[in-house]
C-alpha cells in the first residue's frame, strides 16, 4: 500500500499570508504513460464533507479560487494557499489515486493566526 | 445538478450487519467510479471501497471480506453491505463519485454508523 504523510500537522497563518502544506507518498504516483501525477487535494470544513480542490497534483477543480495551487511530482507534493482568507480555515488532505487502496494523508489543519 | 444522498446509518452492536445506500441524481452511477470513504469521529479520511463502471470492485484491507459494494442501475443507487461490524467501523460513511479517475469530485453529506454494545 502507498502510505501518504503530510506536514505540518497544523499551521496558523495570518490573513493574507501564504500557507504551505506538504504531502509525501511512499512510492511514486507518477503514471509514466501519460506523465500525470495521480495526486488530489481536498478541503474539509467542520461538519461538511470534503471538497475536491486539485487533481493531477496541480489542476484546479472548477470553481476553486486561484489562490489555491499545487505543485510537485513523483513522491513530493505541495499545496499552497497564496493569500489566506477566513473561509480557508479547514483541514486539508492529500490522496493518491494511483493504486488501490486509494490512501489519504492524515490531514493538515489550517487556522488563522 | 449532481447529488449524492446516503442513508442507512444507525446504531448497532458488534457483529451486526447494515446496508448503506447512496442515491444519485444528475448522472448515472454505472457510468462512473463510485467510492465509499469513511471518517471516524475526530479522525481523518479512510478510503473504503470502489466500484468501477465495468463492475470491478476493490476494498481496503480493513474491510475486505466483511464489506461488499454494489450498485443498482435501475435505482441509480450504490450500496455498501457491511457485515461482522466492529467498534472500529464506527464512522461517518461518505459516498463519492469519480469521473474517469479515482479522485473524488462529488461527495454526499454522509451517514453515521455507530457500532457499540
Image (spheres, grey):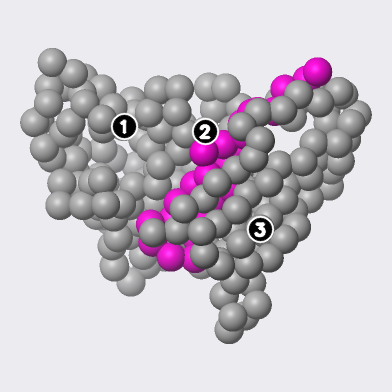
- Between A27 and B44, the one lying in front of the other is A27
Q: Are marks 1 and 2 in contact (CB under 8 Å)?
A: no
Left or right, B34 with reference to A36? left
Residue A91 at x, y percent in the picture:
61, 31
Identify residue for label 3: A76
Q: Secondary structure at mark 1?
A: strand
| Magenta span of residues | A90-113
- Same chain under badges 3 and 2? The reply is yes
Give the residue drawn at x 57%, y 36%: A107
Left or right, A105 with reference to B4? right
Q: For residue A49, which numbered disc appears in the image?
A: 2
- Between B63 and B17, the one lying in front of the other is B63
Dot 3 falls on which chain?
A
**Distance from label 3 to label 2 (Cα)?**
26 Å
Going from N to C along the chain, the mark reached first, 3 or 2, is 2
Identify residue for label 1: B7
Closer to the eye: label 3 or 2: 3
Q: For residue B44, which numbered disc appears in the image?
A: none
User: Is residue B14 covered in magenta?
Assistant: no
Amino acid at each position: 500500500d502507498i502510505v501518504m504523510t503530510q506536514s505540518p500537522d497544523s499551521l496558523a497563518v495570518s490573513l493574507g499570508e501564504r500557507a504551505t502544506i506538504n504531502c509525501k507518498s511512499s512510492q511514486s504516483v507518477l503514471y509514466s504513460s501519460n506523465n500525470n501525477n495521480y495526486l488530489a487535494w481536498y478541503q474539509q470544513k467542520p461538519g461538511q464533507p470534503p471538497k475536491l480542490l486539485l487533481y493531477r497534483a496541480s489542476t484546479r477543480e472548477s470553481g476553486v479560487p486561484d489562490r489555491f495551487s499545487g505543485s510537485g511530482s513523483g513522491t513530493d507534493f505541495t499545496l499552497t494557499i497564496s493569500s489566506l482568507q477566513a473561509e480557508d480555515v479547514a483541514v486539508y488532505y492529500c490522496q493518491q489515486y494511483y493504486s488501490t487502496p486509494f490512501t489519504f494523508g492524515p490531514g493538515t489543519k489550517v487556522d488563522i493566526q | 445538478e449532481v447529488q449524492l444522498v446516503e442513508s442507512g446509518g444507525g446504531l448497532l452492536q458488534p457483529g451486526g450487519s447494515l446496508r448503506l445506500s447512496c442515491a444519485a441524481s444528475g448522472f448515472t452511477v454505472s457510468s462512473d467510479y463510485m467510492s465509499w470513504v469513511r471518517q471516524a469521529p475526530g479522525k481523518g479520511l479512510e478510503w473504503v471501497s470502489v466500484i468501477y463502471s465495468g463492475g470491478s470492485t476493490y476494498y481496503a484491507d480493513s474491510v475486505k471480506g466483511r464489506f461488499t459494494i454494489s450498485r443498482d442501475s435501475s435505482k441509480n443507487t450504490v450500496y455498501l453491505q457491511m457485515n461482522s461490524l466492529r467498534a472500529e467501523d464506527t464512522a461517518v460513511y461518505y459516498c463519492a463519485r469519480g469521473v474517469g479517475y479515482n479522485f473524488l469530485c462529488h461527495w454526499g453529506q454522509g451517514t453515521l454508523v455507530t457500532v457499540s454494545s
